[in-house]
Amino acid sequence: MRIKILGSNGWYSTQTGNTNCVLIETKDFYLVLDTGDGLAKLDREIKSEKPIYLFLSHFHLDHIYGLHVLNKFHFSQSMTIFGQPGTKKILGQIIASPFTVPFSKLKFKVVAQDLREGINLLPKAPLPVEARFLLHADPCFGYRFQIGDKIITYCTDTGVCENLLRLAKGADLLITECTLKSGQSSPQWPHLNPEDAAIIAKRAQVSKLLLVHFTANIYQTLKERQVAEKAARKIFPETYATFDDWEIEI
Ligand SMILES: [Zn+2]
Ligand SMILES: [Zn+2]
C-alpha cells in the first residue's frame, strides 16, 4: 500500500505545509486520516473508483476545516466519514449552512458514521478498526487498522498514554504527532516531542515511525523537522519526519 502525506502541519498552514491529512491507498480502498486543509489535494490522488473511507481523530478545527472543500470534488465513488461518538451530529451542524455546503448538496455521496471505543467491525468497509481515546484537551480517537496482513496505527494529538501504546503495539507503521521540540512538554495541553514518539515506537516494537503534525509556530522550517528526526532516530532508528507530498510504500 501507498502512504502519502497531504498535510503535515499542526494548527495552521504555512510555507512548510498544510494541516493534517494522510492518504493511504490500498488495493481495495482509499483511507484518509483527518481533514486539515491538506484534503484539498485529494483529487490529485484519487485515480480509481475504490471507495473512500475517512477517519477523523477529533473536532479541533485544524483537523476538520478541510471538509469545506468537499464541494470541489466530483468523485464517482462514495465517501464514508467515521469518527468518535457524536461525529454524525457534529458534522451535521458544522458542514451545513451558513458555514459551508452540506453533504446532501455535494456532487458525490458522503455519509457520516459514529464509531464506538473498542474494536469496530464495519459492515460496509473491509477494515476492522480499533479506536481508543487518547490524552488530549478534547476527546480524540486514535486508530489501529488491520489492512490485509499489515497493522497501521494513527494517533495524533495526544500526550504519552497507555492507549497510545496499546494501539501501537507491534504495528507495521505508527503515524503519530510531533507537535513539540526536544525538551519541550505541555502538561495542560498534552502533546509529543520527538523523543516521546520514538520511545513509544520502541516500547510498542513497531516497524516504522512516521512523524506528522509539526505545529506551525514551533516548527517554522523543514530543517527543524530534520533535527527532530535525528533526535528520534537515536532512540528509534526507523523514524521518518514527514513533509507535504512525502510518500512511502509498505
Ligand atoms: Zn491538532
Ligand atoms: Zn487537537
Image: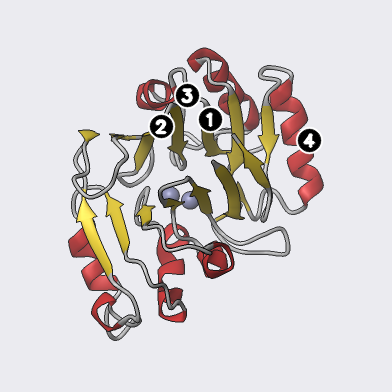
Q: Residue at x 66, y 47 (%)?
A: 247
- Residue 183: x and y in percent read 66, 29
Q: Residue at x 46, y 28 (%)?
A: 150
> What separation in Å lies between label 4 and label 2 (alpha carbons)?
34 Å
Q: Residue at x 61, y 62 (%)?
A: 18
Q: Name which residue type carries label 2.
A: Gly
- Whichever of labels 1 and 4 marks the residue nearer the N terminus, that label is 1
Image mark for residue 227: 4
Image mark for residue 171: 3
Q: Residue at x 67, y 44 (%)?
A: 242
> What separation in Å lies between label 1 and label 2 (alpha carbons)?
13 Å
- Whichever of labels 2 and 3 marks the residue nearer the N terminus, that label is 2
Asked which secondary structure carries label 4, the reply is: helix
Asked which secondary structure carries label 3, the reply is: loop
Q: Which residue is mark 1?
A: 173
- Residue 100: x and y in percent read 35, 81
Residue labelled 1 has its Cβ within 8 Å of some atom of ligand 1? no
Q: Which residue is mark 2?
A: 148
